[in-house]
Image: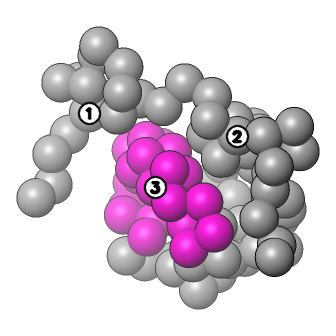
Amino acid sequence: MGHDTPDESPHINADMTILDVVSRYRQTETVFKQYDGKAGVCLCCQALFDPLKEVANKYGLDLAQFVADLKLAASGGEDPVDSPHQESLPNFV
């Protein structure tokens, strides 16, 4: 129910909140962490309940690229967590 099959493009759109996206597609959390640097804040901390279009507008992000990157991660595209360059990501734990 509501789960995407491998042949189906992930359903992510600009009206979804960060919480909507992360709860449905856990692997997108990495993308949000990458965009934290561009936004200058932790997006999951500061904008969890905001629609993606508002987040992009507020923090000066390219909405089309933002959504495309989220869809790529959600569809199982290259995930920086699994990449050999993992050490380049900041560790906020």
Q: Please tell me how crowded label 2 is: few (under 14), some (14-19), or many (20+) other residues with Cα within 10 Å.
A: many
Q: Which of 7 and 45 is in front in this view?
A: 7
Determine the residue positioned at 29% across, 13% down.
Answer: 84
The residue sitting at the left extreme is: 93
Q: Determine which of the numbered discs, if any, sits on residue 75 in the image.
A: 2
Residue 56 in picture, x, y percent from top left: 69, 59
Return the residue at label 3.
29
Query: Can residue 31 be seen in this snapshot?
Result: yes
Which residue corresponds to mark 1? 89
| Residue 22 on image: x %, y % | 55, 67
Q: Three-letter amino acid code at disc 3?
A: Glu
Which secondary structure lies at badge 2? loop
Q: Residue at x 59, y 86 (%)?
A: 49
Task: Kindly identify which numbered label has been placed on residue 12.
Answer: none
Residue 74 belongs to magenta span:
no
Dot 2 amino acid type:
Ser
Q: Is mark 1 on a helix, strand or loop?
A: loop
Main structural element of the magenta stretch: helix, strand or loop?
helix
Residue at the spot x=50%, y=50% of the render?
Answer: 27
Q: Which residue is drawn at 87% across and 37% down?
A: 7
Q: Is label 2 in contact with label 3 (beta carbons under 8 Å)?
A: no
Disc 1 and disc 2 in contact, CB within 8 angstroms: no
Look at the image and tell me in which quarter the N terminus lies. Answer: bottom right
Q: State the image coordinates of residue 74 (x, y, percent, origin top left).
A: 65, 47
**Mark 3 residue crowding within 10 angstroms, few (<14) / some (14–19) / many (20+):** many
Q: Which of 23 and 34 is in front in this view?
A: 23
Write the start and end of the magenta stretch as one range. Answer: 22-44
Q: In which quarter of the image is the C terminus?
A: bottom left
Give the distance between the C-alpha atoms of the residues marked 1 and 2, in whole angstroms. Answer: 21 Å
